[in-house]
Image: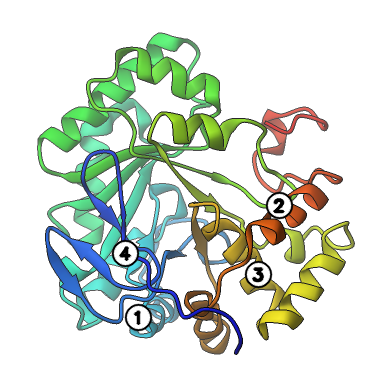
Amino acid sequence: MTGLDIDMPAMKLNDGVSIPMAGTYYSDEIIYANYYVQIGYGTGTARYKSSVGKIDRKLVETIKMAIKLGYYHLDGAEAYNNEAELGVAIKECGVAREKLFVTTKVMGSIEDIPNAINESLKKLQLDHVDLYLIHSPFFASSDADLQAKWAQMEQVKKDGKARSIGVSNFLQSHLEVVLKTAAVPPSINQTEFHPYLQRGNLLPFMQSKNIAMQAYGPLTAITKGKPGPCDDILASLAKKYFVSEAEICLRWCLDQGVIAITTSDKEERLSDYLRVKAFSMTPKEVEDLSQAGLEKHFRGFFKNKFSDNDRS
């Protein structure tokens, strides 16, 4: 493979908590070698269950396989109905808990966040998560609703049940509302982000507030967005760096300081994704792909919350 063999430390969030990045992972001054990724392994989308039900052993083994490959950043959610499977995989994987970065989110139980985190921890068989997120802002009917729920999130952190707290699917307007009253600002906003949904000024705004962006759906340009104006650029860059177009999509996120969440049940594919450690795109290549992406608009999630031409 051509390209630079880079070695990035963890990204330190605005509350001092470190989240896995490519290269070595630093957490509370402990260094874990061979910590490959700034890529989180997601347990949503194809791994989502329609109801909680009995333990899905196939899913447990898939998560364990991802952990074995080096995906120590595990992204879950109450809404996925598979926190129990994630918990079993963590228990059985053989990797020390302190080496894992575990995220879960509250959505359906948003009315009672104190109970929601307790239920999630019970399913995960953990005494704390590394990151706890409000999954969506769309439950709120007023600014006061968002601010009240954020205050409950701050209590979760204060109680030691989450090392870091953040949000998901928030627009700039939602973040501004929360920041008005927050004693502890959100550390992360996890949102759909890819060349065909760059969300206007959201990333620069978050960077100005020291809030990290975490991208889900980073492969959308190739999984759902073809044909499109990015096709030729993706193919050319994949050829140049001897990687897949998926890896170019992931690298496009990483080279903008955006943490990527992806998933697969294919071991070879997950292994290939880790090659993003071995190269980086030039600033011009990142910009060229970004500019091509602006020629098309595609949203994969929460379509009912936005007008067809809304790129926020």
Q: Which residue is mark 3?
A: 248
Q: Cβ–Cβ below 8 Å for labels 4 and 1?
A: no
Q: Earlier in the sequence, mark 2 or mark 1?
A: 1
- From the viewer's side, name the closer residue of 121 and 153: 153
Measure how far apart labels 2 and 4 are at the Cα level: 24 Å
Q: Which of the two residues, 138 or 205, is positioned nearer the viewer here?
A: 205
Q: Residues within 10 Å of mark 1 (few under 14, many from 20)?
A: many
Mark 4 crowdedness (10 Å alpha carbons): few <14, some 14-19, many ≥20: many
Nearer the observer: mark 4 or 3; the answer is 4
Residue 1, compared with residue 47, is above or below; it is below
Instruction: Check if mark 1's residue and mark 3's residue have beta carbons within 8 Å.
Output: no
* Badge 2 vs badge 1, beta-carbon distance below 8 Å: no
Nearer mark to the viewer, of 1 and 3: 3
Residue bearing mark 4: 9
What amino acid is found at the position of numbered circle 4 in the picture? Pro
Q: Nearer the viewer, mark 2 or mark 1?
A: 2
Q: Amino acid at mark 2?
A: Glu
- Residue position marked by numbered label 1 in the rendering: 64
Residue name at image x 61 percent, y 86 percent = 2
State the CA–CA distance, disc 1 to disc 3. Answer: 25 Å
Q: CA distance from mark 2 to mark 3?
A: 13 Å
Element under disc 4: loop
Residue 177 is drawn in which quadrant?
top left
Quadrant of the image containing the C terminus: top right
